Every structure is written in C-alpha cells, then in structure tokens.
Image (cartoon, helix red, strand yellow):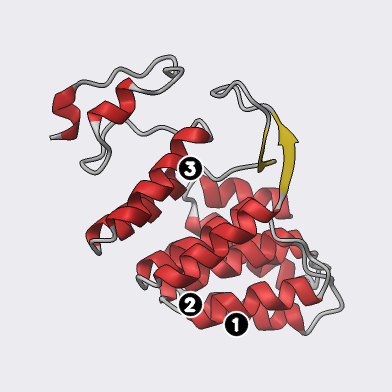
Amino acid sequence: MAAALKSYRVDGKDEEVEAVWNTINEKQFQKNVDVYNEYILYKGRQGDLASAEEIWREFQGSDLAPNVDIYNSMIQICKKAGDSERADALLAEMQQKGVTPTVKTLTELTFVHVNKKNTQRVDEIWKMIEAGVKTRKNKYHTDPEDVPATVPSSKYFEEVIRMHDNLGNTSKADYYEEKMLYHGKFVKAYTWISYGNWLNLPVKPEGIEVTPSAYQ
C-alpha cells in the first residue's frame, strides 16, 4: 500500500491517493510506518497541514516505531507551517527514541530556521552536521582532513549563504561559502561569491562554466 501511495503522490494523482487511503481505512488494513509517512507527505504537499498533524497523532497512538523518514516528513511540515520550535522538539524527540537524524533531517531543520532568519540556530545545526565526521581525503585538496562523511546539498549552502548575505553577515556568508567550495558543492551564480574565488579553486568541477557576468 505504501508503494501505491508513493507512486500516486509522486505523479500528482490526488484522487488515487485518497482512494487508496480510504480503502485502507474501510477494509481496516494494517498500516505501517511507510503508509503513514506517504500520506503525511501527500497532505504536506497539498498544504493541508492540519490533516498532516492529525495523521501524525494517529500514528503516535499506534504501536508502530517511528523511523527517520517520518520525522523528516514532519519537519518538512513544520517548515511549511513556520514552526521552528516544533521542528526542534521533533529533533529532540527522535533522538530520545534512538532515531538517528540524517543529513536530510538536519538540512530540513536548517531550512525551517533559515525561513525564520534564526542565524544562531542555523550555525548550531551546522555544527551538528560537522560532528558526524570521518577522516578522508577530499578530492579538491591534497591533504587528508576531517570532513563530514555526508555533506548537505548545494541547495543547503545556497539557502544559508543567502540568508547571511541578506542580513549583511558578510563574514558568515564567506564562512559558508568556503565550506561549500571545500566540500565540492557548487552553484553557477551567486552575487555574493567573488569571481576571484572561482578562479582560485584548486580543481574546477566538470561541466560548469562561470564567467564574471554570472556574478554581476
């Protein structure tokens, strides 16, 4: 059932999603965590945050153990609702229940706080991301260094740098720019990245061409 819900959700077939969900309820099929997760994601995509919360409460009343995916989905709901306190509470809850947050979890949580312009909390979450490190050689550098085993996407760095830049926090924007470039994450054009920094990259990523006009 979860696979059907996901397929219809991804394809934007709302009527089919509702039909599957109604069949599950009418025939009293047993729901697993993936079924709940898919329906929460569906309601979140619709913007029906109240229904998503209702399904979450139903899930919490079951005997099912939560996994990282359903927590990630609920943090996405918090992002749409602009509820940073609830998002932080969900992170604390999942940790208490022994569910390990992933980079995706912390990325979604970061976006919640970026939207609220909570720079201190964004920086705290970045430290949590960096805490999950292992020693390996980064292909853009010659010396081994502690770097996150998994780093966020370019979108993560884009949102964080743009937030700091818009707030006039130049030093912080530069800090995250350096982190982005170090970890091999690139975006073609930002007004707040200098063309000189691009020229000084030790290794240029393949398939990306940047000209000075891109930064104007």
User: Can see residue 20?
Assistant: no
| Residue corresponding to mark 1 | 54
Q: Is residue 93 left or right of residue 112?
A: right
- Mark 2 or 1, nearer chain start: 1
Q: Within 10 Å of the Cα at label 1, are there few (<14), some (14-19), or many (20+) other Cα atoms? A: few
Q: Which residue is at 82% across, 74% downward?
A: 97
Q: Position of residue 153 (x, y in %)?
A: 51, 42
Q: Position of residue 142 (x, y in %)?
A: 60, 20
Q: Which residue is at 36% across, 19% downward?
A: 208
Q: Residue furthest right?
A: 63
Secondary element at image label 3: helix
Q: Position of residue 4 (x, y in %)?
A: 67, 49
Which three-letter amino acid code belongs to the residue tagged 2? Ser
Tell me the number on the disc at residue 84.
2
Secondary element at image label 2: helix
- Mark 2 or 3, nearer chain start: 2
Which quadrant holds residue 190? top left
Tell me the number on the disc at residue 79.
none
Question: Is label 1 or label 3 in front?
Answer: 3
| Residue corresponding to mark 3 | 179
- Name the image quarter holding the N terminus: bottom right
Which three-letter amino acid code belongs to the residue tagged 3? Lys
Secondary element at image label 1: helix
